[in-house]
């Protein structure tokens, strides 16, 4: 038996993955255990979980892999700072101690974290090769073109390649400082959101705006070639030399300094978001077409932070030349931990690979699961009042009743998701037909901006009744945005939308499932199947039987700034600290009205314990 531990750490989204004879036995992000979003420290808790899930200790590991090459990255930093000296020297000096302390001595660090028990080899993979491996090896394809797009790894920011059987090869790259991820992050910063986590908000904001700055971006910031390659004018950016993303020249070009994060989001911010989104999609589409020419493959796989841009992914699926696409759900750096482990298995050890018809990621449900005793103990310790419903049929009826009464339900089942999206294992769910659901969930449950859209989970076999997905296309990991079908849209809604600007668009009735229909009539779809989603699939089927609607609202189980809940304790705290109506953990059902109230000061302290993103 061969046991491989894959790690990503020290940048953002640290994670650990255990591969046993090529099978993904366990995977988790460190943030879920430490409750610090995007935690970048060594993933000691995630490692512990992986070893426990595999029933082994560090001494039983055959290989440990790290998702990038710190030394090459260090060289890149030095070269960048040197070429931007003297202005870059300050931030260089700031970064140096951390590098010398841990990143350059990784084997020592890892050895210490593994309790000096591990005796095997360390393998350091290339950052984008790790992304590429995480996209291709678990995919359902024997042959696929590979596209990775992110901020930056060692030097690459974009790579194009080809995977066949158990091998993959990256053939083309775009190098730092030219980076689509960093362009997007620059606008995230400029519109007042946090870099490396607020990108999602920019994407969500884009449909409220008009892309009136897109030409300005194309003329000055980024030159895009027909083959998808691009060049960025560094005079407008400050990420090489300084500690901010944009330069004075950028601010002058757009006529104002960056938005203060505390100030109101204006129509201009929405237009900026729409503009960078359009430019991003253009590069993604051109890269996809180029890859198709180069490889002749019918399939495309993607990873890297930009692959979380599901609006761009949706366009590639609908407009690009590929028949099928598959995207690694842990597309950011957490997924690199999986990639390096699979590189060791297939490239270093030369093990064969058989692509599975769905994929080999098991619905991305690769994290901890809690048994009845553990849940009971956790609930009893807090004095929570619950009903245990062992009969699943009855449980599903009870939850469906709640959903039909427009209740908001916390839903904790099965193993926790790997990757940034909740997929029905650690989710908050509701009735998408309810006109008040989006506002209730944003303001009373998540405590976040009301403009943010929610995503639908839909039965895969019913998906095309509601969403314009190509035939046989699925979106198991909520990474494809698709238009809501015309027949589901509210009559006259498109005209009504025309007269509206900005956030007012939210008030236009949009479709039969308003809570999951964005203001541009799009939705970030998760398709659900019995094989991948188990009880969650059965719940939606039951809801469909009762309501005629095969869709639920699915949002991650957390509040603003909080990592998705992992344990029953995390879930209970979030349930009590918000206006969520019910909580279901495996077979336990809790109603808010039965619970001891969390005091106002406790609830406030809970909300404040997470930094806003
Ligand atoms: Fe990356």
Image (cartoon, rainbow, N blue to C red):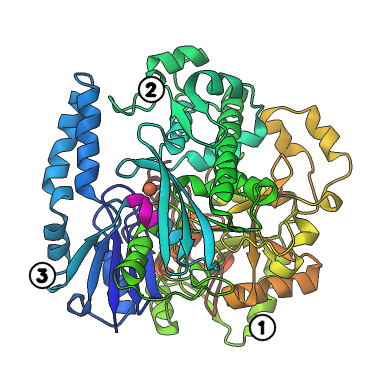
Tell me where residue 407 sits by quadrant: bottom right
**Labels in figure, total:** 3
Mark before the other along the chain sequence, 3 or 1: 3
What SS does tag 3 mark?
A: loop
Mark before the other along the chain sequence, 2 or 1: 2
What SS does tag 1 mark?
A: helix
- Mark 3 or 1, closer to the camera: 3
- Mark 2 or 1, closer to the camera: 2
Q: Is residue 414 above or below residue 76?
A: below
Name the residue: 41% across, 65% down: 167
Badge 3 density bin: few <14, some 14–19, many ≥20, Cα 10 Å: few
Measure the alpha-carbon separation of dots 3 and 1.
50 Å
Q: Which residues are magenta?
A: 127-131
From the image, tell me which residue sits under label 3.
116
Residue 97 horizontal/vertical position (percent): 12, 39
Is residue 106 toward the left or the right of residue 232 in the image?
Answer: left
Is residue 214 toward the left or the right of residue 160 in the image?
Answer: right
Secondary structure mostly seen in magenta is helix
From the image, tell me which residue sits under label 1.
394
From the image, tell me which residue sits under label 2.
234
Is residue 271 toward the left or the right of residue 577 in the image?
Answer: right
Q: Is residue 74 visible?
A: yes
| Mark 2 and mark 3 residues within 8 Å of each other at the beta carbon | no
Residue 387 horizontal/vertical position (percent): 55, 80
Instruction: State the residue in front, 368 or 340.
Output: 340
Name the residue: 30% across, 73% down: 349
Measure the alpha-carbon separation of dots 2 and 3.
45 Å
Q: Is residue 561 above or below residue 120?
A: above
- Mark 2 or 3, closer to the camera: 2
**Label for residue 9?**
none
Identify the image quadrant of the N terminus: bottom left
């Amino acid at each position: 038996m061969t046991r491989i531990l894959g790690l990503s750490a020290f940048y953002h989204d640290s994670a650990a993955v255990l591969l046993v004879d090529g099978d993904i036995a366990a995977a988790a992000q460190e943030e879920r255990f430490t409750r610090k979003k995007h935690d970048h420290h060594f993933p000691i808790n995630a490692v512990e979980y992986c070893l426990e899930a595999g029933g082994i200790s560090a001494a039983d590991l055959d290989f440990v892999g790290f998702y990038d090459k710190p030394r090459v990255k260090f060289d890149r930093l030095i070269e960048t700072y040197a070429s931007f000296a003297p202005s870059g020297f300050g931030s260089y000096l700031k970064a140096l101690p951390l590098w010398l302390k841990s990143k350059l001595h990784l084997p020592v660090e890892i050895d210490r974290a593994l309790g000096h028990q591990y005796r095997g080899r360390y393998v350091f993979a290339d950052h984008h090769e790790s992304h590429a491996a995480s996209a291709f090896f678990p995919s359902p394809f024997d042959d696929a073109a590979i596209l990775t797009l992110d901020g930056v790894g060692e030097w690459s920011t974009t790579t194009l390649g080809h995977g066949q059987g158990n091998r993959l090869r990256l053939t083309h790259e775009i190098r730092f400082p030219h980076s689509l991820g960093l362009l997007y992050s620059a606008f995230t910063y400029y519109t007042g959101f946090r870099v490396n986590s607020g990108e999602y908000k920019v994407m969500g904001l884009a449909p409220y705006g008009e892309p009136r700055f897109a030409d300005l971006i194309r003329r000055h910031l980024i030159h895009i070639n027909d083959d998808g390659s691009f060049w960025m004018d560094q005079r407008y950016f400050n990420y090489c030399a300084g500690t901010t993303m944009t330069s004075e020249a950028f601010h002058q070009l757009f006529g104002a300094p960056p938005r203060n994060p505390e100030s109101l989001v204006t129509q201009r911010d929405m237009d900026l978001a729409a503009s960078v989104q359009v430019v991003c999609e253009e590069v993604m589409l051109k890269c996809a077409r180029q890859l198709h020419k180069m490889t002749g493959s019918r399939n495309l796989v993607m990873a890297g932070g930009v692959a979380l841009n599901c609006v761009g992914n949706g366009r590639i699926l609908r407009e690009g030349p590929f028949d099928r696409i598959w995207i690694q759900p842990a597309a950011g750096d957490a997924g690199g931990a999986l990639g390096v482990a699979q590189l060791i298995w297939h490239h270093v050890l030369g093990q064969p690979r058989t692509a599975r018809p769905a994929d080999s990621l098991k619905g991305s449900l690769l994290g901890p699961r809690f048994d009845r005793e553990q849940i009971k103990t956790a609930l009893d310790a807090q004095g929570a009042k619950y009903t245990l419903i062992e009969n699943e049929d009855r449980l599903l009826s009870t939850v469906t009743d709640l959903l039909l009464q427009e209740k908001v339900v916390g839903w904790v089942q099965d193993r926790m998701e790997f990757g940034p999206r909740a997929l029905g294992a650690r989710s908050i769910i509701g009735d998408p037909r309810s006109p008040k659901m989006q506002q209730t969930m944003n303001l009373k449950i998540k405590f976040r901006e009301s403009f943010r859209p929610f995503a639908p989970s839909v039965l895969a076999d019913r998906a095309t009744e509601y969403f314009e997905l190509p035939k046989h296309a699925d979106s198991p990991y909520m990474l494809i945005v698709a238009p809501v079908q015309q027949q589901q849209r509210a009559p006259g809604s498109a005209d009504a939308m025309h007269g509206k600007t900005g956030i007012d668009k939210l008030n236009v009735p949009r479709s039969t499932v308003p809570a999951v229909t964005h203001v541009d009539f799009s939705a970030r779809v998760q398709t659900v199947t019995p094989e991948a989603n188990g009880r969650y699939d059965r719940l939606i089927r039951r809801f469909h039987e009762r309501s005629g609607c095969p869709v639920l609202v699915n949002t991650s189980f957390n509040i603003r700034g909080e990592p998705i809940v992992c344990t029953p304790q995390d879930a209970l705290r979030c349930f009590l600290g918000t206006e969520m109506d019910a909580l279901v953990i495996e077979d336990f059902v809790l109603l808010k009205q039965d619970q001891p109230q969390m005091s106002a000061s406790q609830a406030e302290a809970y909300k404040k314990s997470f930094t806003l993103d």
